[in-house]
Image: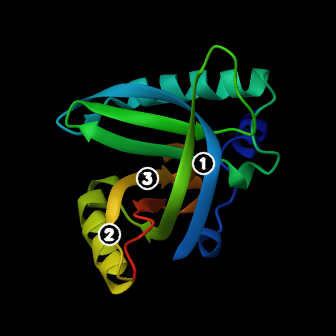
Amino acid sequence: MDQVREKECCPAFKPEKWSEKSFKWNEKRFIKTWIPLFFHMPIPAMVAKKIVKLSAKAERANALEEQREDILLLFTHTNPFRSEIYLSVRSPVQSANNVQFSGNFISKVFEGPYKAIPKFMRQMEHYLGLQEEKAKRFFVHYAYCPKCVERFGHNYMVIFAEINDNTKG
């Protein structure tokens, strides 16, 4: 049973698919929820509970991406006491908070402990500066749950920066 659960957990992550890439999203669909934070620190049980609820809604609606490695679970901190979570979906999900993102995004993959996120954000800002871009906001996609970090031996994170459409030129 544990082997079956492991296979159903996080898919293998391919950093080259997401690192230093640009995306133009036109009404890309997500369902949204939020979690409370304590000075930017999430309560792990709360995160898991909210993700399970979001995933269950999307699964019941048959709205998840067919290729599991294409599913994005994005986090953004709106303030020290709240984080929003966005799960990518193919179609609207009834009884969920449906949202859409349109715009230009640049992504970069990082690997390291969760506590290194502030350092990774600074590195992302530096990378954007080299591209003559500036972020309007950031989202973080964690490639693996904590259990799969141990299983795969890597703790990958993808930082997505939403950039202004007219930064260059």
- Which of the labelled discs sits on residue 140, or is there none? 3
Q: Does residue 145 appear in this view?
A: no
Q: Nearer the viewer, mark 2 or mark 1?
A: 2
Quarter of the image with the N terminus in it = top right
Q: If you read the primary sequence from the N terminus, does the residue marked by circle 3 or circle 1 appear first?
A: 1
Dot 3: element? strand
Q: Which residue is the extreme one toward the top?
A: 95
Front residue of 161/169: it is: 169
Q: Nearer the viewer, mark 2 or mark 3?
A: 2
Residue 138's place in the image compared with 31, above or below, is: below
Q: Which residue type carries mark 2?
A: Lys
> Distance between the Cα atoms at labels 2 and 3?
16 Å
Q: Are marks 2 and 1 in contact (CB under 8 Å)?
A: no
Q: Which residue type carries mark 1?
A: Leu
Residue 123's place in the image compared with 105, above or below, is: below
> Distance between the Cα atoms at labels 3 and 1?
9 Å
Q: Which residue is mark 1?
A: 72
Residue drawn at 65 percent across, 68 percent down: 14
Quarter of the image with the C terminus in it = bottom left
Residue 109's place in the image compared with 49, above or below, is: below
- Which of the labelled discs sits on residue 134, or is there none? 2
Dot 1: element? loop
